Image: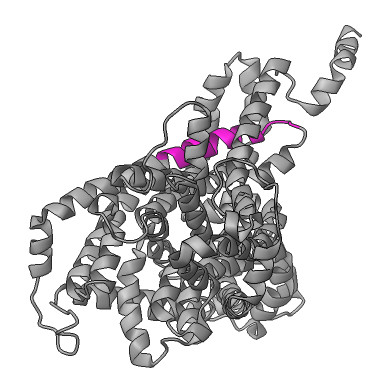
Amino acid sequence: MENNQLQFRDSFKNRHFERNDSWLKIIVIYLILLVMCVVTVYPMLNVLSVALRPADNLFQLNLQIVPDNYTWDNFRRAIFEIDLLLWIRNSLIISILTATIAVCFSASAGYAFSRYRFTGRKTGMMMFLVTQMFPGPMLLLPMYILLVKLGLVNQFLGLLVPYTATAVPFSVWMLKGYFDTIPKSLEESAYIDGASPFRTFYQIILPLAKPALAITFLFGFMSAWSEYIVAKVILTKPEVLTLPVGLVSMQGQFNTQWGVYSAAALITSIPVVILFISLSRYLVGGLTLGGVKG
Amino acid sequence: MSENQQAVFSPNPKKRQKNLAVSRWTPYWYILPAFVVMAIMVFYPLGYGFYLSLTDMSLATFKNPNFIGFGNYLKLLQEATFIRTLLRTIVWTAVNVFFHVSIGLFLAVLLNRKLPGKGLLRVLLIIPWAVPQYIVALTWRGMLNNQFGAINIFLQKIGFSALPWLTDPTWTFIGAILTNIWLGFPFMMMISLGGLQSIDKEFYEAAEIDGASSLQQFRNITMPLLKPVLAPAIVLGTVWTFNMLNVILIIAGGFGNEKTQILVTEVYRLAFNFYRYGYAAAYSVVIFLILLVFGMTFMRRTQGIEEVR
């Protein structure tokens, strides 16, 4: 009885917070988290602030987010006066293709690593992990020479292959981890019903793995959307530039274009940030599963 | 692997009906596409890069480079800048990864509690991960501006003097570290959060009944159970940080000062500014070997590799 009363009195706190926490502890936790949120959000607000400043008043000595004389002019100029739309189009094409191909390839490889026991399995998985250790520039130079020989410089295909190769190893690990969590009894019953292994994979396992596939797609997309170094080396013609190369090239004319650059940076990063965050609830599960489960 | 699963999935066609058509080659077919891409873009360049490091290929000898054995390596090890850059790279990596993991883990522990509104807080906290890296770097470069940057304005508002972020190379390097810490902790936070959520609450309840303090619980329950999740993430994070070209390149605004360079930026500079391809390749082979040895040792120490059965 006494227990019940006690529970009733503290029920509000218990329902919403950890049972043993004092109010002081709760407040401190919130404070820490809020300070960290300010730290993570402020730089992006800073970009917004610069983007809203009029061109003749870019440099200000205050920390105001919305300037007094704010204007949307920089956004208009970003869309109409620089090649932003072209860069976005180029980046969209490359990113969507990269993500699609990476998902297909790594889903099938991840499935094999998860379901079959075969010679070279362990070595193969380690190989995919070890590729992450290669310094980018080490691959960049031979890759560049190879692409020159194949005549793929300034071609989207020349970016597509290295981008897919970058996205694949991580995706293989992640999808393998996810497939491991799908009970094998599902396939057993499909086999009994006479389905072929490929059909089982395609019609039963893949639909169940949708969240992991979405994350993999997102990863491939984001890595291609944000890649700067390879694109900078491979793309030189103005009409094929991707977003990162285009935007960083504006840094040269920082003084006059800072506002326009900031507007363009916001236009290009907000969709990715929203995409990323909306899928983030799959992220926690997906990543951990992929990382380690045998 | 239970007996049952082994029986169904061992690639032994005799045990099943014919139309399943699983041969011992089936798994290899599944892996083939991914393997081909990796072969073209990773394994071939790797081999070629190693070969390059044994030649004197440069712009002048691009068509027919001379084979010079380990000459590049000998030259590299004798160079004082190499050692300095290596030490700087180690400092860069160690400081970054330390803060990534400690901030990430700390926030994950806080977010793993019952806390109204934690969904929103988590979303705000992963923003640095969601924003494209080059935009982050450019933004921080703007904020580090000596005169008009937000950081110096803030420092002056709270009574400190402005710091020469972009003019003094040491401060530029510190600025790059700050940027990269900001960039990297959400990854570790999400990895740790995932790991924490998979830990059974009953362990903590049992520990509480036995009178363990929360610090004891953290050390004896959380850490051991997080290890298999964190170890591979730390290896990956170390490799990514060690090879972080974007941030350094953009924050320092190029290769201006040696004091802001790490090994990978040196490779990039040697290859694409000085066209000393052979020498640059030797640099990258050294980087690769360092990371390989580190990765293997670390994984073996923490036994993360045991998980990969």
Say if B44 sits above or below B115 in the image: below
Q: Is residue A48 above or below residue A103?
A: above
Q: Which residues are magenta?
A: B98-115
Look at the picture and state if A287 lies above or below B182.
below
Q: Is residue B105 magenta?
A: yes
Q: Count of labels shown?
A: 0
Verify whether residue B127 appears in magenta.
no
In the drawing, does residue B155 fall left or right of residue A90? Answer: left
Q: Along the horizontal axis of the image, is A59 left or right of A132?
A: right
Q: Residue at x 41, y 38 (%)?
A: B98
* Residue A117 visible in the picture: no
Please name the residue shown 45% across and 44% down the image: B147
Say if residue A150 shows up in the picture: yes
Q: How is the image coloured?
A: one colour
Percent position (x, y) of residue A90?
Answer: 58, 80
What residue do we see at 56% from left, 64% from top?
A: A261
- Majority SS type along the magenta span: helix
Residue B260 spot, x, y in % from top left: 29, 51
Q: Picture quarter containing residue A145?
A: bottom left
Residue projecting furthest to the front: A56
Between B268 and A146, the one lying in front of the other is B268
> Going 37% across and 92% down the picture, which residue do you hit?
A150
Q: Nearer the viewer, residue A104 or A119?
A: A104
Q: Give coordinates of residue A102: x percent, y percent.
A: 56, 74
Position in image of residue B52 (x %, y %): 20, 76
In the image, residue B50 sits, relative to residue A69, either above or below, namely below
Q: Quadrant of the N terminus of chain B?
A: bottom right
